[in-house]
Image: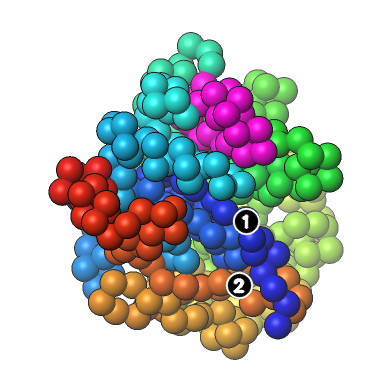
Amino acid sequence: MTEPPLSGITVVSVEQAVAAPFATRQLADLGARVIKVERPGGGDFARRYDTTVHGESSYFVWLNRSKESLTLDLKSARGRDILERLLGEADVFVQNLAPGAATRLGLGADALTERHPTLIPCTISGYGTSGPWADRKAYDLLVQCQTGLVSLTGNEHGSARVGVSIADIAAGMYAYSGILTALFTRATSGIARPVEVSLFEALAEWLSQPAYYTRHGGTQPPRLGTRHATIAPYGAYPAADGGEVLFSVQNEREWTALCERFLDRPELVDDPRFATGPARVAHRQELDAIVAERFRTLASGEAMELLDAAGIANAGVNSVEQFLGHPVLDARGRWRDVRIPGAVVPALLPPVDLAGVTPRMDAVPAVGEHTDTILAGLGHSAADIDTLRAEHVI
C-alpha cells in the first residue's frame, strides 16, 4: 500500500473548538503526525459541548481522530519550554487562540519564523490579526451574522442560522489548503511561508455571489427557504403523502420537459409569464401555485419517478437519520470504524479519494493520552514526568 502523502510531517497544534481542529484532522487523515496541545485537566473545551457519542462530544469525535493529545500549561515556563522543543522538530504549527494570546506567549508568526525558520506557522483568527476588529472574539454564528449570511437564510417569516458551523468549516478548509500550499512551497523553494486565515474572510469568500448580486442589482437576494433567488422553479414542494421533494429547472430544455411530462401542461412552455428564466422568477408565485397543485396529486415517490423520467434533477428532503442510512454511503463503502475512549463508532471516510492511498482513521484521543510518550521522546525521564504532573505543568 502506498505510504500516506504526509508521512514524516509533524504538526503541533494549540487548538480548540472547530476551525483549527478541522484543518489539522485533515492533515492527520493524510498521514501527518498531529500533536494536539490541550489544557491540563479539561483539555479542549469542545470536549464538553455535548456527551452524545458514548459520553464524548459529537464535535470532538468528528474533529480529532488520528491525533496525539499532550496536556501542557502554556502559562508556565516549563510548559512553554516543552512546546518550544516540540516546535524545533515540527513542520507546521497551528493555533486559534483568543485574540492576542499567541503573541503574548511568543507564538506569533513573526516570532516563530525568527526562531524556527523552517516552521510553517498557521494562525486562525476571527477577523484577522490586524484591522479594527483584530481584538474581537468571533464564534461561528457571530460571523454568519457579520457576513450577512443569516440575512439570506430562513424564509419570509424570519432569518435562520445555517445548521452546521459553516464559518468554522470554511476557515478550517482554507487553513488546510493553505498549509498544503505552504508545504509545497517549502519543498520546492526552501521558503517556509506563514499562513493566516480568518473566519470572517473565509466566509466572506463564500458570500461572493450574493455580494455581487447585491452590489450590482441594488437589492440583496430575498430569504426564500428552499427556493432560489435567481432560478424558478427551484425548491421543495410537499407531496400528497406528506413527503417533500426538491427539484430544479436549470434550462429551457428542462422547462419544456417539466411542462410536458410532469405538469401535463404543455401550453405553459410558451406562456409569456414563464417562457424565460427571468420571467419565471418574476412570476414565481403563480408558477409555484401551479407546481404545488400538481404535487398535491402525487405521492413523493411517484413525483420523483416522473421527474426522473423527464430528466429533471430531484431529491427527497431527508432527515439526518435518513442521511445516515443513505444507499450511496453504504454502496460505496464510506463508513469506517473509529475508536473513541471506551467505544467504537462509525465515521465517514474523507471525501477526497487518492488512488492507492488509504486514509488514516485512527483513534480519537483521551485528554493527555499521549503526554508521557511524547515527553519521553523528548528525553524526559519517568521521574521528571511525575514532577511535571505534580506541578500541574502537564
Real-space Cα separation, disc 2 to disc 1, in angstroms: 15 Å
**Closer to the camera, 125 or 221?**
125
In the drawing, what numbered circle is on residue 9? Answer: 1
Residue type, numbered disc 1: Ile
**Closer to the camera, 161 or 122?**
122
Residue drawn 48% across the image and 46% down it: 86
SS for dot 2: loop
The answer to whether residue 363 is above or below residue 153 is below
SS for dot 1: loop
Furthest toward the left, the residue is 390
- Name the quadrant containing residue 260: bottom right
Q: Which residue is mark 2?
A: 359
Q: Where's residue 40, x and y in %?
A: 24, 48
Taking the magenta stretch, the answer to whether it contains residue 110 is: yes
**The N terminus is located in which quarter?**
bottom right
Q: Please say whether residue 324 is visible from this viewpoint.
A: yes
**Closer to the camera, 24 or 12?**
12
Q: Nearer the viewer, mark 2 or mark 1?
A: 1
Taking the magenta stretch, the answer to whether it contains residue 57 is: no
* Other residues around mark 1 within 10 Å, as few (<14) / some (14–19) / many (≥20): some
Residue drawn 67% across the image and 38% down it: 118
Q: Where's residue 216, x and y in %?
A: 72, 23
Q: Which residues are magenta?
A: 108-129
Q: Where's residue 308, x and y in %?
A: 69, 78
